[in-house]
Image (tube, rainbow, N blue to C red):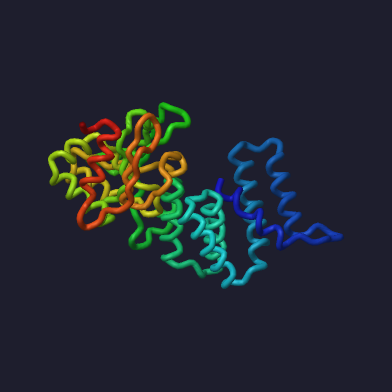
Amino acid sequence: MLRRYTLLVMFAFLACQHTQPSEIERSRHAITSAAMAKGATEQQRLARIRDAYDDMVRVAFDRFDDHDIVVLLDGAYNGAFFGNDVASVGLAATLLGVMKKRGIATDKHYLDMHEAFMGARMFEDARALAERHPVPGIEAVPDLRSDVTVPGAPTEMVVDPGARALLRKSVDLEQVQVLVVSHPNCHFSQDAMRDIEADPVLREAFAHAKWLGPQHNNLKFDAFQRWNHEHPAMQHTIAYRNDEWPIIDWWGTPTFYFIKDGSVTARFVGWPEEGRRTELLTALRKVGLLR
């Protein structure tokens, strides 16, 4: 599926008039012929399409030298990192395949590709890459199950306490009054949790809060699992995709959202050294969690 996204921009460099079919045109014809082949099984047909597409990729990217291929890959990684964009991830995967054939792919490239897959929630692709290229530092991919019950609602991934597994679930925002965008490895998030747990009033009120990790290339599964063991009253989940959460307009950590009747009544970003006790108490009263 990744291959479908990758060559649209590149073809602009290759457009020209030919009295005879070009290599690109012959490859395109091969794809069409494979798609319409009679007497072939579905698996055979798809395999022929993939082979023909790979030929088209080779022809297109053969026009670029090694330096430009690396630059293109860096741009694709940036798109994947900042936007978790499937198209960018697909382009990166194709470019990495070209680099592998040229013998210029490094462990760092495979590690970055794995993280791009993880960020785009393409866990099966990440797992397959890790099996083919088990480079040092690569994160083991958790099993992902789905229990999405409300189409169109935001979803979160619940961290299994005893296994390397995630459960994707729908979230009813009508039941959420306090939402904290946080990450276990963010020391400001750690400071906020420490201060909240040490304050009896805040601790009781924040027992109703949802602690949500942003969609990110580095899943850091172990960190979330450890947080949940250490803070059993304030379990941390992970957003499946940021764009499922339109109520969140800033994913920096920590960011505190206070919600009433579906609208944000207060938002605070960061955790200063002196804490935010007065601000939090005021915001908690607005949403009805304190009198």
Q: Residue at x 81, y 57 (%)?
A: 21
- Up the image or down, 161 lies above or below 2; here it is above
How far across and down, in percent of the image, does residue 93 sit? 52, 56
Q: Is residue 182 visible?
A: yes
Using residue 290 as the reference point, say whether residue 69 is left or right of it. Answer: right
- Up the image or down, 109 lies above or below 216; here it is below
How far across and down, in percent of the image, does residue 237 sit? 31, 41
Using residue 196 as the reference point, say whether residue 238 is left or right of it. Answer: right
Using residue 59 as the reference point, say whether residue 107 is left or right of it. Answer: left
Name the residue at the top extreme: 149
How far across and down, in percent of the image, does residue 224 sit? 27, 47
Q: Residue at x 61, y 72 (%)?
A: 65
Q: Which of the 4 quarters of the picture holds residue 59?
A: bottom right
How far across and down, in percent of the image, does residue 5 sit? 60, 50
How many labels were placed on the picture?
A: 0
Q: Residue at x 71, y 39 (%)?
A: 36
Q: Foreground residue, 227 or 276?
A: 276
Image quarter in which the C terminus is found: top left
- Up the image or down, 152 lies above or below 62; here it is above
Image quarter in which the N terminus is found: top right
Q: Foreground residue, 104 or 237?
A: 237
Name the residue at the right extreme: 19
